[in-house]
Amino acid sequence: MLRKENDNLEDIIKAENLTFEYYRRDEEGNVEGITTAVDNISLTVKKGDFVAVLGHNGSGKSTFAKHINALLYPTEGTLFVNGIDTTEEERLLEIRQSAGMVFQNPDNQIVCTLVDEEVAFGPENIGVPSEEIWERVEKSLKAVGMFEYRNASPNKLSGGQKQRVAIAGIVAMKPKCIVLDEPTAMLDPSGRKEVMKVLHELNKKEGVTIILITHYMDEVIDADKVFVIDGGKLVMQGTPHEIFSNVEQLKELRLDVPQVTELAFELKKAGVNLPDGILTHEEFIRALSRVVKSGGA
Amino acid sequence: MLRDITIGQYYQAKSPIHALDPRVKLVGTMVFLISLFIGRNVIMYAVATAFLAAVIKVSKVPFKFMVRGLKSIVFIAVFSAVFNLFLTEGTPIVQFGIFKLTWEGIEMAAFMVIRLIYLIIGSSLMTLTTTPNDLTDGLEKGLGFLNKIKVPVHEIAMMMSIALRFIPILIEETDKIMKAQIARGADFEHGNIIQRAKAMIPILVPLFVSAFRRANELATAMEARCYHGGEGRTKMRPLRYKAKDVKAYLILAAYLVLMIAIKMLRNGALV
């Protein structure tokens, strides 16, 4: 089966000056101009990390995500997934197996009419023997908490459940890394919570690297590392704490910050002695009570 | 309103027929259809009737479900019966001008109608006892030999199963679009046929646009999951013949041999 030579690599994703351009065409097909969707991005993602990629619509974050799965190839620069250059065509399946991808619309990525067959679709494609497919399907459905729905039709599931099935379908291919392109954008709040819980569990228990593309700030807080992309360029990177300490820059990039962070930021501007980059309610309460005790307001 | 449409006509039950390999059922239907065409005599039809009745009994599908399929062929049946009745040469019973009712005509018409009815019942028995998914699998595996003459069997089967998956989604979407257009004053219920057909355009255009978008996204998602055609693909539930499938094949063979034997023994005896 597939080669396992890259197991010791520390960086699962490594982008070097990654650039992607596409031609804009008018109705007759003449080239109107060139749009640079991804502009000279260099970054690395460590194995086992939970990474969030932030950016508003049209920032190029989805285009970047598609490169990781070798659905698009860089115009310039290189991208290594698990040590493999994504332009190596003969190792395409290996790349797609090491970096699975989950898309935004749960309906448009489910292929089969039964949940268990859906999860089996990926392993079937890479030629896993039948007995092992059964094991993998059971294990991945249990990992996302959908095992009792294995004989149901995907049409009968809620959005959050469908998305969990889609994630199970990727997990069954035993990827080292899962890229999720706004997986919660079409879900209701409870569906979003379900999906986020599953992702964090996969990351902690199975050690799968998660790359979450999103524009929901509250999904970013628990990440190990955050990349902010704007206009195709990598504009900020760091821990959530570092990123959200920089409220002014985020606002310039038309990105929201979590409510508590914003409140703390405004209070600080008004002269309250609070630290930068408060992300959770607990942190805020602790910091504020410290301020109150010391009578510093 | 559109949600009520069901695809296929699978009737869920636990019967030996339901449990058979879909390929057996495909071959069985073919054998039955062929047996109806190899000869026309009373004994052969009696055997065919007994065989069909036995299979229906074993399948546990209520008889009224088979009859439903017959509605669609009433016209053809009546049409061919009338033609056979009056246009067959033979001993006339009654004569109206160039049309004459003959004994041969009555016999011919009777066989014709029975044959049509059995054709429909026989094939709906297959669709009633096999899920669309199994049917697709059976076709893929059973017609696999066509691959050798470059027929993309796997791709066709994949298209069929994707269609099955998306039909309910597209029906729901049509419903949504219709409601959205009605809310903006579209009228689908009045006017003549042409006006009504024109009124469908505001439904069809967005439906097609959305279907193409879905197809595009689905193709990307399938590619991302390493889909690369049927080559080197394994199956979670591979079709494997079991003892009962072999038994079913033997019964089918016995039935076919019996029919041919009758045909040869009675050759020419009763038309």
Image (cartoon, rainbow, N blue to C red):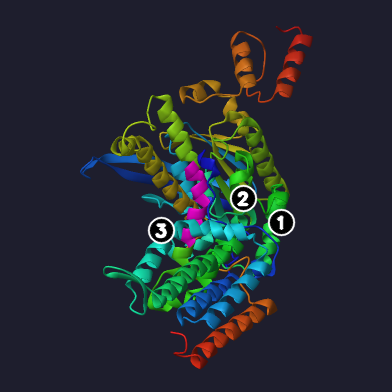
Q: Residues within 10 Å of mark 1 (few under 14, many from 20)?
A: some
Question: For the residue labelled by badge 1, is the local secondary structure a helix, a strand or a loop?
Answer: helix
Q: Residues within 10 Å of mark 2 (few under 14, many from 20)?
A: some
Question: For the residue labelled by badge 3, is the local secondary structure a helix, a strand or a loop?
Answer: helix
Residue at mark 3 to residue at mark 1: CA–CA distance: 55 Å
Amino acid type of disc 1? Lys
Residue at mark 3 to residue at mark 2: CA–CA distance: 37 Å
Tell whether label 2 touches label 3 (CB within 8 Å): no
Residue at mark 2 to residue at mark 1: CA–CA distance: 19 Å
Q: Position of residue A264 (x, y in %)?
A: 64, 16
**Could you tell me which chain the residue with mark 1 belongs to?**
A
> Badge 3 is on which residue?
B75
Q: Which comes sooner in the sequence, label 2 or label 1?
A: 1
In this view, the mark in front (2 or 1): 2
> Badge 1 is on which residue?
A139
Give the residue displayed 47% in from the left and 59% down from the top: B160
In this view, the mark in front (3 or 1): 3
Total numbered labels: 3
Magenta segment: B158-171
Instruction: Decide if residue B42 is on the left or right side of residue A275.
Output: left
